[in-house]
Image: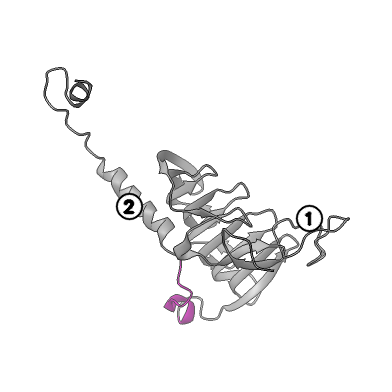
Amino acid sequence: FFFDKMATDPAGAPKAPKPKDPKLEAMKEACTRLYREPAYDENHQDYIIGDFRWSTKKIVNVTSTQVYRGLADEDDKPHGWGLMQHHNGISHDCARWEHGVPNGRGVFRDPEGGAFYGEWVNGKRHGLGCSINKLHQMLIEQYEHGQLQSKTKWKIDKEHLRCAHCNCLYMEATNKLECRYHPDGVDWEDRFTCCGALQKHNPQGCAVDYHRQDPRPK
């Protein structure tokens, strides 16, 4: 029968399952932890009595198109945990900023709806990481000082949700205050009535809330 033919080799013996690659399996496990677990704990001792004990929690307008929320040094540079957001939809949440430079584990999201989970060293991606594109395809990636060394197709992601307001991928278990949106619409000049910003200059939003898939109450 067809099923029997598929289950046996030409000699009639059952086909042996293809052995798993231990290295690849270890990479899959590590990548699963990267996207399922929070990048950092704001109450970790490192931020209280460690390297960042003198940092202060702030909201900093880094440029006219960038806003940072998190720990910062006396010069208002990101220093410790924090989230950098751009008006065009790019965001970078990192466990360890050092005087404005990402230097630790984090999540990078792009305006197309993709995400990258991994490590940064001196501002560049380094080591093992996991990327998810707008089609929810997951890839395992290896970087060396910002240069992509390898890319392996993994699986179709079925765990992330997509925010109905900012289009970002997010995990319900690690959902946090990082969804930017405009509470009100635009007027005849294409200015948002909630903040006065032109739509072309600040399409992402002036307010911050948790990611969600349903409309926000008025």
Amino acid residing under circle 2: Glu
Left or right relative to 63: residue 116? left
Residue carrying label 1: 199
Q: In the shown orientation, is residue 183 left or right of residue 29?
A: right
Is residue 39 in view? Answer: no
| Circles 1, 2 touching at the beta carbon (< 8 Å) | no
Q: Which residues are magenta?
A: 40-49
> Mark 1, mark 2: which one is toward the viewer?
1
The image quarter containing residue 73 is bottom right
**Residue sitting at 63 percent across and 57 percent down?**
165
Report if residue 80 is visible in the image: yes
The quarter in which the C terminus is drawn is bottom right
Q: Secondary structure at mark 1?
A: loop
* Front position in the image: 113 or 64: 113
Q: Which mark is residue 158?
A: none
Instruction: Give me the C-alpha separation between circle 1 and circle 2.
Output: 42 Å
Residue, disc 2 = 29
Which residue occupies 60% across, 53% down?
167
